[in-house]
Image: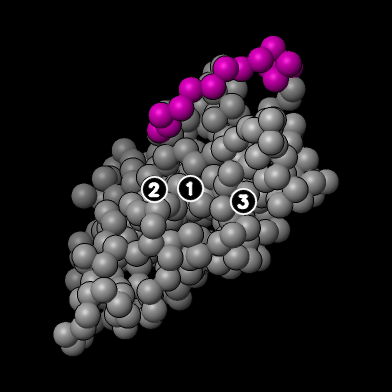
Amino acid sequence: MQEVMLDKAICSLGSIKHLAKKLGIHREHVYAWIKGVSKIPLEYALQIEYLTGGEIPWKDLVPFHIVQRLKHLNLQLPKFDLPPCELVYVSIERITTKKSEFISEQNKLIPLHKHRSICVDQQNRLIFGEKIFYLYKYHHKKTIPAWRISLSDLANGHYSSELFIKNFLISERVDIGMALEKFLGSRQGFRTDLAQPKKTVDLRKKDYKEIRLVNEAAQVRSQKSMPLRQLIAHRLGFGSHFTYQSAKKVKLFANPELIEKVDQCIVSISMAKKLCSVLANPKK
């Protein structure tokens, strides 16, 4: 049991090297825990629970007699939100993606450290950065720097929108928004078939006081019925859902040069949207 939970902690933090670095110990200590040569001390078990955001409880890491000795002690670690800009190193073999990208010879010559980091969710599914991901695979790298975002925490408002504005490009925020749309499972708004109104109401009015949306292990709560695109725009700092929809259109239909200019704030989102419409309908 302890070995299994330790493996989960290593996967969550990226590698044995990064787990040891976070704990401030040598890798040999972690290898000793894996092989069963030594037990995980309580202080490090508590740190692992903290680093994994409570995903790996300390009770599953320490010997049973320590748990029994402390069974009357209620240890509650303070809840904290990992900013989306925190960089972790993820094993390339654990990242899943359905897209494939062609790597140009020009990109192969650019040093890896000059590329922007990719982004993955809690299940290590790639959100953006396909070209960089396959570039690392081309160079036979075992790990890759990545931002890890919990889509359920994002939907529940556990991240500050200012952090997304500060650390992500506009096109990257759009990719995160589309991943959140897919995660929540609806592009039109919250699902009302899962709603549980307190009293009998007219289903046509959609004025539920509480709407519950269940997707995988996530539960998104809202005091009022809010369209999904408005929720995403608010979470990712787009201001309004019109701006998010315009940025999404630019991301999907504009050429890479125009997207880059929007990311650099040389061209506004509204102007880029108009250019997309003109290019799509040149006769008009």
- Residue drawn at the location 45% of the way across and 47% of the way down: 179
Q: Split into 4 quadrants, where in the image is the C terminus?
A: top right
User: 163 or 233: nearer the eye?
Assistant: 233
Q: Quadrant of the rendered structure where residue 175 is?
A: top right
Instruction: Please say if the residues under marks 2 and 1 sit with CB atoms less than 8 Å apart.
Output: yes
The chosen color scheme is one colour
Alpha carbons under labels 2 and 1: distance apart:
6 Å
The kind of residue on which mark 2 rests is Lys
Task: Using a 10 Å C-alpha cutoff, classify the residue at mark 1 as few (fewer than 14 neighbours), some (14 to 19) or many (20 or more).
Answer: some
Name the residue that disc number 3 marks.
246
User: 95 or 141: nearer the eye?
Assistant: 95
Name the residue that disc number 2 marks.
182
Q: Which residues are magenta?
A: 96-109
Give residue 215's position: percent from left, percent from top: 29, 56
The kind of residue on which mark 3 rests is Ser
Q: Classify 115 as above or below 215.
A: above
Give residue 244's position: percent from left, percent from top: 58, 55
Give residue 67's position: percent from left, percent from top: 23, 68
Name the residue that disc number 1 marks.
178
Label 3 or label 2, whichever lies nearer to me, is 3
Q: Quadrant of the rendered structure where residue 250 is?
A: top right
